[in-house]
Amino acid sequence: MQTTQAVAPAIGSNGKPSFHIAFCVDNNYFRAMGGTIASIIDNNPGQHFTFHVLAFEVTEDHQRRLKKLEDMYAVSTQLHLLDLASFTQFSHFLGHSHYSLSIFTRLVIPTVLKGQTDRVLYLDADILCVNKLDELVDMDISLDIAVVVPDAPVTLQRRVAALGLKHNQYFNGGVIFINIAKWISEDITQQTLDALLDSKTDMRFNDQDALNIVLNGRARYISPRWNYLYDLIHDLNVNKFAMRPVGKAVFIHFAGAVKPWTDWSGHDARHMFRKYLSLSPWSDMPLDPEPKNTKEMRMHSRFMYRQGRPLESLKWYIRYLRKRAAK
């Protein structure tokens, strides 16, 4: 494992220690992560952050842009290039698992960051911060393995039943506040790997399901405003393009198949994303002008039909069929 470490002040102008945040991304998600990071910085003036990026490989261009964050803002960045073969607990998975190795990335966060910080906030890169993190920064999690946020009610009930969970709890893995020492001492990573291997149930959400099995009744739950799930498909299916009210949400998590960087969606969420992207080193990268894959093409065809644009709908449905046939 290769780590690029930056030297920067560990105390913000607010007098508080640096707050550590981790992302697990591939090259396709650095632009999205740039928007997430800029939204955090913009809404939390005075707070120093250390952003950790865990990845298997990163282009030189993205490495340069990540480093540029330190020139633009009073933050630290660390790039952790991973080789799972160097983690002994993954040895029986390598070459023998039907799971993509990428799903294991966030499971090594505590091991990678041990000795650097006692706690770290993991975030998915399809999240935008729209409020202050003070409450989380000041939160005492010394007695907790992890602090999590409940998933959408329908998902929660379905996964509790599907996984046979004892406690009526199920969290979304997009936001996890980790107590590194307790996570390691409780052997959460190994237990999660065992759950992935041993489970006889349908692990639809892979490591998220496995983490829920292991942490059921052991994690601390906080308000949904810390992982406010926003499904853009819900809006587009009914021709609504304005953002719905999100109340006191801190993190808006665009967890559905349509993301805020899809310019073709026509949804106002793209303006929010563009605003924050413009504050990042990835500001010159455009939003997606049109659907890229078969799933997006089929959805866009449906959206066009519901907007009363049958010819556009037919065009995209034909493109969808052609791309699917070419696979």
Image (cartoon, grey):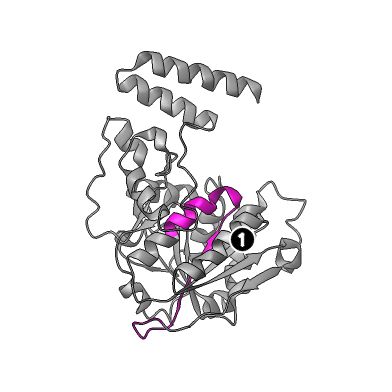
Q: Is residue 146 above or below residue 127?
A: below
Q: Which residues are magenta?
A: 12-36
Q: Position of residue 103 (x, y in %)?
A: 60, 54
Residue drawn at the location 66% of the way across and 71% of the way down: 3
Q: Quadrant of residue 85?
A: bottom right
Q: Could you tell whether 284 is left or right of 154 in the image?
A: right
Q: Position of residue 164 (x, y in %)?
A: 47, 53
Residue drawn at the location 50% of the way across and 31% of the way down: 295
- Is residue 248 shown to the viewer in this render? yes
Q: Quadrant of residue 43?
A: bottom left
- Is residue 171 shown to the viewer in this render? no
Q: Position of residue 15 (x, y in %)?
A: 36, 86
Q: What amino acid type is highlighted by mark number 1?
A: Gln
Circle 1 residues within 10 Å: few <14, some 14–19, many ≥20: some
Camera-nearest residue between 27 and 167: 27
Residue drawn at the location 25% of the way across and 52% of the way down: 246
- For the N terminus, the quadrant is bottom right
Camera-nearest residue between 132 and 102: 132
Q: Is residue 264 above or below residue 269?
A: above
Q: Secondary structure at mark 1?
A: helix
Q: Is residue 137 above or below residue 102?
A: below
Q: Is residue 95 above or below residue 43?
A: above
Residue drawn at the location 33% of the way across and 45% of the way down: 271
The residue carrying mark 1 is 63
Instruction: Confirm whether the magenta stretch covers residue 27.
Output: yes
Instruction: Confirm whether the magenta stretch covers residue 58.
Output: no
Q: Position of residue 241 (x, y in %)?
A: 27, 36
